[in-house]
Image (tube, rainbow, N blue to C red):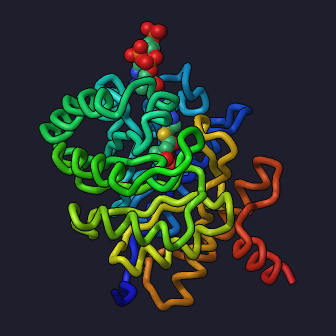
Amino acid sequence: MPLPHRVKIVEVAPRDGLQNEKAFIDTAIKVELVDRLAAAGFQNVEAASFVSPRWVPQMADGAEVMARITRRPGTLYSALTPNLKGFEAARAAGVDEVVIFSAASEAFAQKNINCSIAESIARFEPVAQAAREAGIRLRGSISCALGCPYQGEVPASAAVDVARRFLALGCDEIDVADTIGVATPAKVRAVMDAVTQSVDPARIAAHFHDTYGQAVANIVAALETGITIVHSSVAGLGGCPYARGATGNVATEDVLYLLRGLDIDTGVDLDAVVDTGQWISAHLDRKSASRAGNALAAKRAA
Ligand SMILES: CC(C)(COP(=O)([O-])OP(=O)([O-])OC[C@H]1O[C@@H](n2cnc3c(N)ncnc32)[C@H](O)[C@@H]1OP(=O)([O-])[O-])[C@@H](O)C(=O)NCCC(=O)NCCSC(=O)C[C@@](C)(O)CC(=O)[O-]
């Protein structure tokens, strides 16, 4: 399939990027991160999580983050909601899109959300209904769709099965996630081809981590199967607390540099993202994991 002319990037750093940080990050920094990313032109920013604070303490201030950000018209602010309690909190906070999340691997579902895949779907039914009634967009995320830290290989049919269940729940968008960043382009093609037999590719997002340095190649493979939504995290921040050995999401700067080279429009200002990547990395006292971000910042400094 020819490459698309336009791709939507969902910037996930404020949620997926920060959730695994050990030291609690000031709410003011989270707010500034969301605001800088929205100002850079992202249509969709994953801003918070309304999960159990005992499970993911870093995300405990989601309501405050949502209350303090400056809403940019045209930006959709999303948050994770594992159950009705999370949904009610997200709705009260004014979230535009709620994200339910399960897995293509039973072992990972147990570790991440403390239930089986089937139980998770049953738990999401009232969330989906409440979202529909409230007119809030619904997204479903399938972890370990391309490999699992506990189970190893995951058959494409497992991702297809969860994607169909999410579609039946009324999800507007469905993320196919390489939670631990183990996939290579052949696996991406196989899984995306299988999932898009059942779900319109326009509703599928590629959510890739970069543990093995394959994420940029995997994104090209996904785009070649008709996918036009890509998730990424500024400075490559991220990692899942329940995915041993997983590094961050693919860096947004690397994705923007790739797409610019392919003449694919995103509507996002790469320079502003490079600045944000350098700013948040300095705040976290580490070097950015984005090779394009570091190269562009160094070039500018020279
Ligand atoms: C699903 C549960 C809640 C089950 O956790 P549980 O312990 O089985 O649930 P529970 O219903 O027995 O509740 C336990 C306690 O949590 C509270 N609680 C319950 N729900 C909420 C809520 N929404 N907000 C606030 N508090 C909540 C509840 O009130 C209770 O408090 P207590 O009475 O003991 O004081 C838990 O396992 C959980 O929160 N898991 C979230 C884990 C998580 O956030 N993981 C990272 C995000 S997923 C990810 O990163 C992957 C993704 C999406 O990026 C894609 C990819 O790359 O794979």
Q: Position of residue 297 (x, y in %)?
A: 77, 75
Viewer-side residue, 258 vs 69: 258
Residue shown at the point (40%, 81%) measured from the top left = 224
Q: Is residue 190 left or right of residue 241?
A: left
Q: Is residue 280 visible?
A: yes
287 is higher (above) or lower (below) than 256: above
Residue shown at the point (40%, 68%) measured from the top left = 190
Q: Position of residue 15 (x, y in %)?
A: 53, 45
Q: Position of residue 302 (x, y in %)?
A: 87, 84
Q: Quadrant of the N terminus?
A: bottom left
Residue shown at the point (29%, 31%) measured from the top left = 118
Q: Quadrant of residue 243?
A: top right
> Which residue is most to the left?
133
Q: Position of residue 205 (x, y in %)?
A: 38, 62
Q: Is residue 14 visible?
A: no
Ligand 1 appears in which quadrant? top left
175 is higher (above) or lower (below) than 301: above
Q: Quadrant of residue 63?
A: top left
Q: Is residue 258 left or right of residue 231?
A: right
Q: Is residue 47 left or right of residue 175?
A: right
246 is higher (above) or lower (below) than 176: above
Residue shown at the point (75%, 55%) measured from the top left = 281
